[in-house]
Each structure stands twice: as C-alpha cells, then as structure tokens.
Image (cartoon, grey):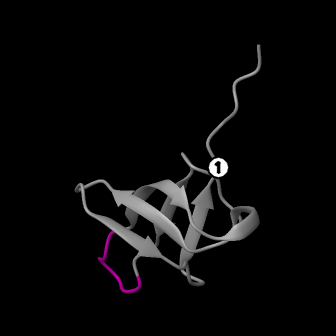
Amino acid sequence: MRATVGDQLVQHGRVVGQHDKVGEIVEVMGQGGNPPYRVRFEDGHEGVCSPGPDTEIRHRQQTSQ
C-alpha cells in the first residue's frame, strides 16, 4: 500500500450499519509512500494509521493541462 500527501484513506465499516471513516493523508511517515500515515479525518481528529485489510487508499487525481 503506497500513498502520497493529499490522498484519501478510507477505513471501511466492519459491521452492518457502521459507516466508512474517511480522512486525508497529511504526512507519509514511511519510506517510499509506505505506512504509517498521519491522517486528518472529517471530524478534525488526527491520528497515525498503519492501514489494515479493511482500508483503501484513494489517490488524488492529477490534472492534465
């Protein structure tokens, strides 16, 4: 799993009715885009995450000009 600053980290809910938790990666602490990541979640909370199998990285779109 590799990410860059600005990508979204999505932790999928583990049980029925639990919502996904979405945050923006604000710091990549591992080498070469690897975890751990410092993530700012939608509620303003920041934390350090080492993503598990229920996590997805959504890469930000690069704009072409």
Q: Which quadrant of the rendered structure holds the N terminus?
A: bottom right
Report the residue at 56% width, 74% height from top: 36
Q: How many numbered discs, if any? A: 1
Q: Is residue 63 above or below residue 8?
A: above
Q: Where does the image place residue 13, in percent across and percent down from the top left?
A: 40, 77
Image quarter of residue 34: bottom right
Q: Where does the image place residue 5, in percent across and percent down from the top left?
A: 57, 49
User: What amino acid is at disc 1?
Assistant: His
Q: Which residues are magenta?
A: 14-19
Q: Where does the image place residue 64, in percent across and percent down from the top left?
A: 76, 20
In the rendered image, residue 2 lying in the magenta stretch gets the answer no
Report the residue at 72% width, 68% height from top: 31
For this view, does 62 lie left or right of residue 29?
right
Report the residue at 70% width, 62% height from top: 33
In the rendered image, residue 18 lying in the magenta stretch gets the answer yes
Q: Where does the image place residue 58, in percent across and percent down from the top left?
A: 60, 54
Q: Is residue 45 above or below residue 24?
A: below
Q: Main secondary structure of the magenta part?
A: loop
Which residue position holds label 1? 59
Q: Secondary structure at mark 1?
A: loop
